[in-house]
Amino acid sequence: MSSAPPRPPLLPTHVELLIHLQPPQPANRQACREEKSGIGANKFTSRTHPKLGQGGIVGAEVTASLAAVYNERSSILAKMRTSRVCSEMRMRSMLRRFVIASCLLTATTAIAQDEDFPPGMHARYAAAGETVERIDPGVQFVWGSDSPDPRIPQGEFTVEWTSQLLVRQEGKFRFHAYVQGDLSVSLDDRVVLKGSANQPVWISGNAIEPGFGEKALAVRFRKKGDSARVQLFWSSDAFPLEPIPAQLLFRDGDSPGISAVERGREQFEAHRCASCHQRDNLRAPLPAPSLAHIAGGTSFEWIARQIADPSSASAHARMPHFGFSDDESRAITAFLVSVAKQPSLQKPGKQAKKATVPDDRAGQILLRSTGCLACHAVGEQGTQRTYGGHDLARVGEKRSVDWLYTWLAKPETLNPQHRMPLFKLSSTERRQLARHLTTLKTSDFKAGKPPR
């Protein structure tokens, strides 16, 4: 568990990167195409400068001479400008190709690294003579007075994390931490950050130049008071203060035993096994989704089917299979609906007549561009993690458009224990996204009340 610390003093909130790979303007592209043909010079004629054709100002011969001189000068200047523009375009094109090639090379290298170095940090916790090893994705913990792991007792403890940190660019770096306790951070056996505090404070190390490549990272922490907290950050000349990304942390080889225990622990907690099965020092299980408003905007048929066979709605369903018959499932559903509270659902309204893109199509674009797929899956697209969101491939069989529209704006009114992030969507965008989600279904029935 982690919470955002206050902004550190005397640290930048952002860095302006003056790297612009903007494509040239169409006029410049046209100029390059015209470079060889000689087209594009500004022409000096009586049409462009009509006063030159009036005998009261200059004569025809003078006009022709001036026009010839001007046109020759303009042609030379145009070719010089065009040559410079084309040179810039060629340089930008080469730079873009280099960037693309570098990205492809980095991706290939990352794949090879994933095979040799599994992600995460090897952690070793110790307290009162008990030692526990596990894999942590990073160092972002707010324990308070709790034990850092249910397998060790409460009280003072120590922990050491080790991993390989991938530094992807040259330059100066600084390590920072928001810490309550004793902390020491080393990179390639060199201490880069050290501090101690009885209350949460920011500490920062000196600027270093670690160089490009994988560096041995070691983080040591000791709880020294009633509460413990440690959150590790870094910054550089190229980016502002940020948590050290988990995708840059790798372990030297896998530990099958530790990995199996970690996967089991994660599954045990995510599926809320502790709700029924108890043992000492277990954390309180995560709350299950609230059923207080199950009758509002949710399909009766979907609820009954979910109770009878949770895997029918999604292969990743976490609800236990109790083996209920269809009649038993429908009876339980009827009871849940009878005692549920009717939520206050917002109406999304209608699409404006002047809209050029249908709501369904606009919502499909939003689904793929606003970050939904970082937590949810839609068929083969998106992400399905242990603690991620539900598969949305058939959400249209479950929820009404009013429910989805309300959920995107005020999820806490439908489920106080929700984990849904609140996106800054306009009412139009929420309507478009909700309408598209209702089209994701394989069955024809709609959300409604139980049959009578």
Image (cartoon, rainbow, N blue to C red):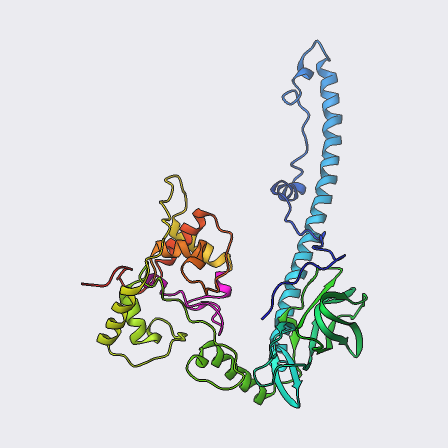
Q: Look at the image and tell me whether residue 22 can be seen.
A: yes
Quarter occupied by the N terminus: bottom right
Q: Is residue 61 above or below residue 313?
A: above
- Residue 261 image position (x, y, % from top left): 54, 86
Q: Of 164 and 109, which appears nearest the observer?
A: 164
- For the magenta stretch, what is the residue range? 372-398
- State the image coordinates of residue 313 (x, y, percent, origin top left): 34, 71
Nearer-the-camera pick, 23 or 143: 143
Q: Nearer the viewer, residue 61 or 169?
A: 169
Q: Is residue 114 left or right of residue 18?
A: left
Across and down, in percent, residue 30 comes to 62, 42
The residue at the far top in this view is 56
The reply to whether residue 168 is visible in this rendering is: no
Question: Does residue 127 belong to the magenta stretch?
Answer: no
Residue in the image at 67% along x and 38% along y: 38
Position of residue 399 in the picture relative to residue 377 (left or right): left
Q: Is residue 124 above or below residue 176?
A: below
**39 up-or-down from 327: above or below:** above
Locate residue 211 relative to residue 447 in the image: left or right: right
Question: Which residue is located at x 38 percent, y 52 percent?
Answer: 360
Q: Position of residue 439 (x, y in %)?
A: 34, 58
Q: Is residue 392 magenta?
A: yes
Please identify the quarter of the rendering in which residue 306 is found: bottom left
Query: Which residue is at a point 38% across and 41% down the rendered structure image?
Result: 352
Question: Quadrant location of the C terminus?
Answer: bottom left
